Image (cartoon, rainbow, N blue to C red):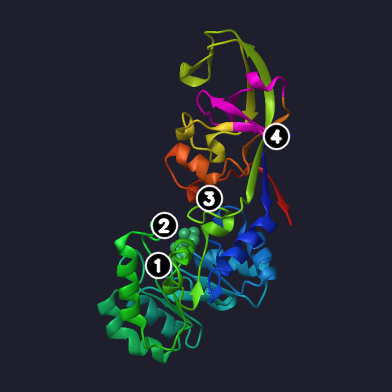
Amino acid sequence: MSTARLTINLDALVTNWRNLDAKTNCETAAVVKANGYGLDSGRVATALAKAGARNFFVAAAEEGVALRRALGPGPGISVFSGHMEGDTKLLREFQLAPMLNSLDQMLRHFESLPGHAFGVQLDSGMNRLGMEPAEWAAVRDIALGQNPVLLMSHLACADEPDHAMNAQQLNVFHEMTDGIEVPRSLSATGGILLGPDYHFDLCRPGIGLYGGQPFGDAVPVVTLDLPVIQTRDLMPGETVGYGNTWTAARPSRIATVAAGYADGLPRAMTNGGLSAYAGDTPCPVVGRISMDLITIDITDLGEDPAMLTLLNEVQTVDTLADAAGTIGYEILTSMGRRYARTYQG
Ligand SMILES: *Cc1c(COP(=O)(O)O)cnc(C)c1O
């Protein structure tokens, strides 16, 4: 076995969903866009459905099709991008509910799929997707006449609890939806942690389910084990990898492991002070990250391991993200296609 091994702990995923659910008195759905944040939307959603999740969100109708095939009939599947041209057949055949984003999408939906479930996405200030207050005011009576299943909006700064934008968007969402007898949803992972004012009728966590920040109490879901392909001894003064960026200061032993930036491990995390773990023992990552290989200083280990672990309970997707100047979401959704994947639970 010379490819890295990604282990996805579905029990940990379910634990995270339950723990997020326990923070609210409302329904907790699950966001499984981008193929379940890179971890396989079918497997993720099936595990969560067994645990009691009844509604799932994806970014595009095509993702909804794959999810419906995995889940079968029953669970709700909603599409954030709404009803785009060309989506009609998929929405109908696979029972997907578009979250309509604009007047155009509304007209398309009511004309081509009358009576078919839909929600409305409102822009409360993020300026990304959804109808703005004036647009909504103009069409809301027509929209409400067609019985939407959900009114939703999305917070721009929920991972910063003290940010004034949170309260501002909350106010706008209230102004746009108060008094309407339709279930409402404002919060993803970050919003759940902002407290009950933000919960409404349904929360839509994504990243927290997969073990990422801002859910500080998340249980890690992924483990990444990298096989050691070769080990070697270096004399002081010898260098490692492209650009000679690391020089041995003492007699050193280097292990070369199979994974690199082609597997979604950013080259930018080269100098991020990361380790690869032999059991509980951290060994420093040294030199540049190559396309398929990473070099590790195992001098202090005193033996040659068969595997070194890059993601575990201690070093999480957020540790890697910090080292690379990005976010856990990007690390997860970039997880390499050539990893051998094992699902636990
Ligand atoms: C991605 C997304 C979510 C989930 O966000 P997390 O931060 O991963 O919990 C919820 N709602 C919308 C509209 C999204 O785009």
Front residue of 246 and 219: 219
Q: Residue at x 38, y 56 (%)?
A: 160
Mark 2, secondary structure of its residue: loop
Q: Which residue is mark 1?
A: 154
Mark 1 belongs to which amino acid? His
Residue 215 in the image, given as x and y percentages of width and height: 51, 56
Is residue 298 in the magenta section? yes
Q: Which residue is mark 4?
A: 279
Q: Which residue is mark 3?
A: 333
Reading the chain from its start, which is encountered first: label 1 or label 2? 1
CA separation in Å, label 4 and label 1: 40 Å
Evaluate whether residue 60 shows in this view: yes
Query: What label sits on residue 159 in the rendered view?
Result: 2
Q: Which span of residues is magenta-colored?
A: 276-304
Mark 4 belongs to which amino acid? Gly
Q: Is label 2's Cβ within 8 Å of ligand 1?
A: yes
